[in-house]
């Protein structure tokens, strides 16, 4: 195995999981914002539909 192969193995097994964990942590920090935005959007759409039909 060459030094390049070793570097790629290290990248694959250590950097990839680290990036994945980092992304998940960021996702969980953002998710409350995302959830509230989705709720507001859905409620807003429901509101528009109910007022439009009456």
Image (spheres, helix red, strand yellow):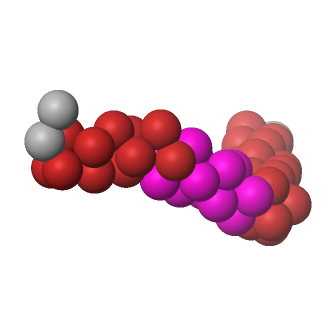
Check the image and name the residue furthest to the top: 1
Depth order, front residue of 32/11:
11
Which residue is rendered at x = 53% and y = 55% of the image?
19
Magenta residues: mostly which secondary structure? Answer: helix
Which residue is rendered at x = 57% and y = 44% of the image?
17
Measuring from the top left, give residue 41's x and y in whole percent: 72, 56
Query: Magenta stretch: residue 7 in it?
Result: no
What is the quadrant of the C terminus in the image?
top right
- Quick check: 38 left or right of 3? right
Measuring from the top left, give residue 6's x and y in whole percent: 28, 43
Q: Which residues are magenta?
A: 15-26
Residue 14 in sight: yes
Query: Magenta stretch: residue 18 in it?
Result: yes
Please state the total of marks drawn on the protein image: 0
**Quarter holding residue 46:** top right
Measuring from the top left, give residue 36's x and y in whole percent: 85, 60
Which residue is rendered at x = 40% and y = 46% of the image?
10
Residue 8 in sight: no
Depth order, front residue of 12/43:
12
Which residue is rendered at x = 17% and y = 32% of the image?
1
Depth order, front residue of 4/53:
4
Q: Is residue 8 above or below residue 26?
A: above
Q: Is residue 33 above or below residue 4?
A: below
- Quick check: 49 left or right of 20? right
């Amino acid at each position: 195995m060459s030094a390049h192969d070793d570097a790629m193995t290290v990248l694959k097994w250590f950097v990839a999981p680290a990036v994945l964990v980092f992304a998940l942590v960021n996702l969980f920090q953002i998710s409350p914002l995302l959830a509230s935005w989705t709720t507001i959007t859905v409620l807003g759409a429901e509101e528009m539909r109910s007022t439009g039909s009456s």
